[in-house]
Each structure stands twice: as C-alpha cells, then as structure tokens.
Image (cartoon, helix red, strand yellow):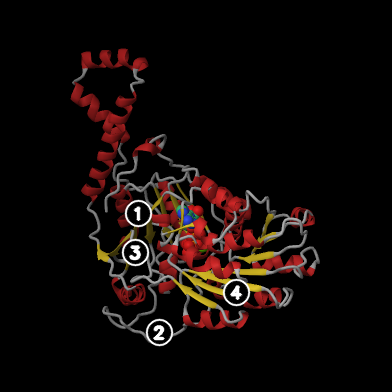
Amino acid sequence: MTKFSELNISESTQDSLKRMGFEEATPIQEGTVKYGLAGEDVIGQAQTGTGKTAAFGIPIIEKVDTSNKAVQALIIAPTRELAIQVSEEIYRIGHGKRARVLSVFGGQDIGRQIRALRNNPQIVVGTPGRILDHIKRKTLKLDGVETLVLDEADEMLNMGFIEDINAILSNVPDTRQTLLFSATMPGPIRKIAETFMKDPQMVKIKSKEMTVENIEQFFVKAQEREKFEVLSRLLNVHQPELAIVFGRTKRRVDELAEALSLRGYLAEGIHGDLTQSKRMSVLRQFKENKIDVLVATDVAARGLDISGVTHVYNFDIPQDPESYVHRIGRTGRAGKSGVAVTFVTPREMGYLRVVEETTKKRMTPLRPPTENEALLGQQKLAVEQLVEIVAKNELNDYREMAEKLMETHEAVDLIAAALKNLTREPNETPVKITEERPLPSRGGSRGGDRNRGGGGRRRSNNFRGGDRNRRSGGGGGSRRREGSRGNRSTKQQ
Ligand SMILES: Nc1ncnc2c1ncn2[C@@H]1O[C@H](COP(=O)(O)OP(=O)(O)OP(=O)(O)O)[C@@H](O)[C@H]1O
Ligand SMILES: [Mg+2]
C-alpha cells in the first residue's frame, strides 16, 4: 500500500482524504493518479469497491483551478444515483480546495439545474441525456473542459447512450484528457472506448479473480416456483444487516418487493420506472437502515456504494457475467466482507458455469434451508434481542408487572411467549410472483459454451417489464424488526 503523500498530491487534498478516513491509496489509485496528474488518458480496471471514484477524483481535484469559472472536468455516469454519489465523493475530496461540484440528471427540475450551472461549477457530474440537454440549451459550456471521465462506460453503452456520448464529446475540446473506469471491460467496450481516447495508459489491477476475495460466493439450485420460499428462508437464516435482491425485470422487482413486504420484511424496490424522488427516498431509507432489503434491477444498482450491505441475492441469475460481477460487488466493498447467493434453475446451470469461467471463481453450492432451520435462525435472533434488552437494564417499569405475572404463570412459559412474540415464524401469506421464463438454454449443465451470441448486443433485461408503477406501502412491517438493528450482525451462510 502506498501513502497518499507519496503520490505527489497537495496537502489540502491529503487532508481531505484523511478526513474521509482514507489512509492509504488503493492499488487502482496508486496506479492511475500519476497518469491522471500528467494529463494522460487512462483506462482503469479494478475490482468492485476498490476506490475507482477517487482514482479519477483525486487528479481532477488536484488539477482544478478554483479561480477559473469554466467547467474544467465533466464526468458522465449511467444513472442519476451514481451521478449524485460520484459528485458527493469528489466534493469531499475537494473540500480543502473548495472546488465547486454539481450533479445534473434527468428527473430533477431543469430550472434549478440551470440556476446552479450559472454559479460556475468547475466540475460537473451527470447522466448523458441531461448533459446533452444542457448543451443544447447552452446552459452548459464545455470548451474549458480538460478532463472527461466515463464512469461505468460499458453500462452506458449497454443502455444505448453511445450517440449521446458521441454528441457530448463533440462539444469537448480535443485536447482533453479522457479517463475511463469500470470493474469489467468486455472486449467490444474496450475497442469503442479506445476510439474516444489517445494512447490510453491501461491500468489493470491484476488479481486472480475478477471478484474481490472478501465476498463468499454461493449458488442455490431451485425451481423457478420454489425460489421465493428459498429466499425467505435464506433471509431468516442469514439475518442480513442490509441485503440487496436482484431481479431480472422491473415487474419482477415490483412483485418481489411487494411479496417481501407482505411477509414482514422491510423491503422496497428500485428501478428506472420510478420517479426520481421515489428512487432517492428508497435509497435514503436503505442507507438509514429503515429498509433492510433493497430489491433492484442491474441498472439501478450499478456502481452504488452503500456501506453495510452484507448480502446480495441474485434471485434471477444475470444474463451476462459482467452483470454478475457488478451485482455482487455491492457487498464486500472497501475491504469489508460479504456474502453473495445466486439462484439458478436447473435449466440455467450453463449460465452459472459461464459466470464462473469469467470470474475465475467457483461458487459453493448451498442447500436451501429447511423450514425448521429458518425458524431456528429467527429464534436465535429473538434470544439475542431478549438478552440485549436485559443487558440494557431499562426494565424498571416492567418488573412489577412481571412479578405479578409470575404468580399465575410459569417463568419458562412467559419467556417462551416473549420469544415467540419476537420471532418471525414461517409465514404462509400468499404472495404473487409471476414465473419468469428461464434464460434460453446454454446447452447442458456443464456449460462452458464460450461461443455465446450477443457479445455487443444491447441487453434487454432492464428494458422489459416496467408496465406498472410500483404500489407503495405494502404494510406488514413486523414489530420485531423495529429497533433491532444493533444486534443483527450475526452472519451465517
Ligand atoms: N484509499 C481508500 N481508503 C479507504 N477507503 C476508500 C479508499 N478509496 C475509496 N474508498 C472507499 O471505498 C468505497 C468504494 O469506492 P468506490 O465506490 O470508488 O469503488 P469502485 O471501485 O468505483 O466500485 P464499483 O466498481 O462498484 O463502481 C467507497 O466507500 C470509498 O469511499
Ligand atoms: Mg465506481
């Protein structure tokens, strides 16, 4: 590990990084900051959660001239949430220098953004569509841009943003420096990326596997119709602090969020058809631990950095190995540990093998928990909660009542009743999960089919469904979840 002081960066930026709790540079930061500072183009590839944002953020902050009113750096990101997150991180890195950073994205009042743009931000982070909109309105001038960043470029190209990106690039001076970062760099994407760039320095952080080793990776084989029960049981056994469940389509996400709420989990869905304010409020609730389970599509979760995500469940196996890498990378970030479980129907085993070949990592088979094991997991949790309440020693208002109860009942029955009340018991509430068709067969369960069609094809999984707005609420939030946070770090697999 390298100290930031060895990377030739200013005291003020070093102070900001210290304030953020960054003590040493991660390998991708160590590898790219010098090129970034020297004005060279860089293609940076490193595993999820290893600090790629600061890898481009640090040189941007170092180079920005705060006495110059022009926009000097433009960062393009695939989603609104990511644009916000990246702008916040860069703002923090630029704290000492007082650089002005602004995020612009669709779904937010454009008038407000236009006014903010008049305040001369030096760094703008945005989604392609909205950036282009501002260029057309002449509310965003890019002739002073020296550094352009494409974060998650492959996702933007998958989403069909290539023309928008080309149009944006034609408004940025040719003399600019271009930086491109992602955890995965599929071949065709790299080729396209190179056409945007001049003699890019390739910085690939070598690792045996594509995924970080602090994520334990499991798969569970289940029939499509069994998957939801298996998910509920796994949640009961694993007791995740925060979990993300990925579904293949927007409809799937809506139905899963609804079904989980009905069964008493604090769950909400997030996907591209929700209004911007709904998406932001769901994410905020998740970050504040008011939701335990976030159900999401691939796109909605790309690049998101939420600390405390302990478990990722791929309710549907992703079609591309790259999606798998990005999905499970929502856990195990910044050196923390995480667990990923991928559901696979027998017909989809071929996809699992392709994922494993790409990531160079075998997933461990996981037996679906029995109903009894799920109950036991929850009972254990109830015991922990009860003991914790006792340890808090705030029971004075209850002692008298308790003593009275003990005159007529056995102590053991009373405790058993309290435990029962705290336990999430197997719940048969009917839920509606429309069966998804399995992915097209990949020829046999050993897979290994390298000749998969559609390498450069636009992914369709995030563009289907979404024919309904998500019903809000769902009720059923269980009592026992409330105030039980601090106690739920027990991780089992
Ligand atoms: N040098 C560092 N020391 C400690 N923490 C860091 C350091 N650099 C980044 N982090 C933290 O690590 C987390 C992950 O960083 P970041 O979001 O940049 O990852 P990423 O590589 O872009 O991941 P993804 O591929 O998922 O987009 C963030 O919370 C970030 O603040
Ligand atoms: Mg990132």
Taking depth in this image into account, of 349 and 448 the one nearest to the observer is 448
Element assignment for label 4: loop
Q: Quick one: label 3 or label 1, which is nearer the N terminus?
A: 1
Type of amino acid at the residue the image marks with label 3: Thr
Q: Position of residue 419 (x, y in %)?
A: 27, 32
Type of amino acid at the residue the image marks with label 1: Ser
Q: Assess disc 2: are there few (<14), some (14-19) or many (≥20) residues with their C-alpha within 10 Å of its C-alpha.
A: few
Q: Is residue 332 visible?
A: yes
Measure the alpha-carbon separation of dots 4 and 3.
Answer: 39 Å
Mark in the foreground, 4 or 2: 4
Which residue position holds label 3?
342
The label shown at residue 40 is: 4
Q: Position of residue 59 (x, y in %)?
A: 60, 63
Which residue position holds label 2?
452
- The residue at 52%/68% (across/down) is 32
Measure the alpha-carbon separation of dots 2 and 1.
Answer: 32 Å
Taking depth in this image into account, of 197 and 478 the one nearest to the observer is 197
Q: Assess disc 1: are there few (<14), some (14-19) or many (≥20) residues with their C-alpha within 10 Å of its C-alpha.
A: some
